[in-house]
Amino acid sequence: MRASLGAPILGALMWLAAAAHCPASAADNESATRDPAEAIREVDARWSEDLFAGRLDRVMENYDDNAAFLVHGSPVIRGKPAIRAWFRARLDTPGYSARFRPTEIIVAASGDMAYELGEFEATVLSDGRRMHVKGKHLVTWKWNGARWVVTAESINTDGPAVAG
């Protein structure tokens, strides 16, 4: 009787061990078989909500380890640690919030690369006043075999921040 109980338990443990080492989530596996542009739109929606909510770890899950980030007034920001530091500074700014959305996603014929154009809005407190800024972004994506990740992002504002 012990042998018959041991096999199912051993099998369950092996399954759990394999699942623990599998980096792709069910949603990621599903996105491998779906329309790439729609999959990227869904990633964007979660990413924007995570940014708005200040969930930095979840924001950073969207970036490739070697991603580049381009912002006005700064040299190219390279790699996840540097990009994380940039976002950490924004999220630590009183009253900061931001949301974005893609307006266009173009997928390469190969299906493993894409770029997106979009727009964003951000708000901060400055001298007790709420300041609002709008802008646009360009994001490049690659399919890493398990999910879509950002390889480069460039953001810039449409003009100076305005009270609002």
Image (cartoon, helix red, strand yellow):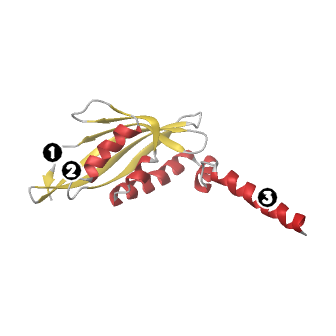
Q: Which mark is residue 11?
A: 3
Q: Earlier in the sequence, mark 1 or mark 2?
A: 2
Residue beneath label 1, please?
160
Q: Work out which quarter of the rendered image holds the C terminus and state it.
A: bottom left
Amino acid type at image mark 3: Gly
Count of picture labels = 3
**Residue 15, quarter of the rendered image:** bottom right
Q: Residue furthest front?
A: 2
Q: Earlier in the sequence, mark 3 or mark 1?
A: 3
Amino acid type at image mark 1: Pro
**Mark 2: few, some, or many residues within 10 Å (few <14, many ≥20)?**
some
Question: What residue do we see at 57% from left, 36% from top?
Answer: 112
Question: What residue do we see at 69% from left, 57% from top?
Answer: 16
Q: Looking at the image, do the residues carrying marks 1 and 2 touch, with CB atoms under 8 Å apart?
A: yes
Amino acid type at image mark 2: Val
Choose mark 2 or mark 3, whichever is in front: 3
Residue 138 is left or right of residue 65, and the answer is left
Residue beneath label 2, please?
133
Instruction: Tell me the SS state at disc 2.
Output: strand
Pick the residue in front: 162 or 49. Answer: 49
Instruction: Tell me the SS state at disc 1.
Output: loop
Q: CA distance from mark 3 to mark 1?
A: 61 Å
